[in-house]
Image: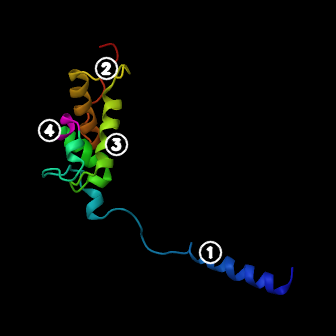
Amino acid sequence: MNKRAITLLTVLGGFVLSGCATTGRHGYSGHEWNEPRQPYGGELTGPGVALLDPWLLDTAEGRAVVTLGFSEAANGFVSEDVANRANIWFRRYADENCDMQITDPEIRTALVTAAGRYLGTEAPPPPIGQ
């Protein structure tokens, strides 16, 4: 290797290593990271609202699933893409027996469970043997 190549590699190596030499405390302890997650509190808007399944639109749990589960809808605006993805995700999540049909009990159970997971309020599993 010639002297120019060695000098160039040394300079580039110095630049690479200088990025690793940071000081101070870095973390996610700011205000927005410490508060519990909350679903959007207002009415959902946007072109995707008309496409949402009724149980996602008309229930508080369903709105929590949409606004907390899809970051694009965090401010209450639901695009067509988000609505389609939310519907598909929820239908697959709710279909416990994988028969491609969801029943009212499956919908209710899935709404409560999914919203509880997003809000951090899910119930503990029942004891074994009960």
Main SS type for the magenta part? helix
Label whose residue precedes the other's in the sequence (4 or 1): 1
Label whose residue precedes the other's in the sequence (4 or 3): 4
Secondary element at image label 3: helix
* Snapshot quadrant of residue 60: top left
**Which mark lies nearer to you, 3 or 1?**
3
Name the amino acid, label 3.
Arg
Name the amino acid, label 2.
Pro
Tag 3 and tag 1, C-beta contact below 8 Å:
no
Quadrant of image for the C terminus:
top left
Residue 17: give its label. Answer: 1
Secondary element at image label 2: loop
Q: Picture coordinates of residue 77 (x, y %)?
A: 22, 55
Residue at the location (80% across, 86% down)? 4
Secondary element at image label 1: helix
Residue 85: give its label. Answer: 3
The CA distance from mark 2 to mark 3 is 34 Å
Q: Mark 4 points at which residue?
A: 58
* Snapshot quadrant of residue 89: top left
Q: Mark 2 points at which residue?
A: 127
Label whose residue precedes the other's in the sequence (4 or 2): 4
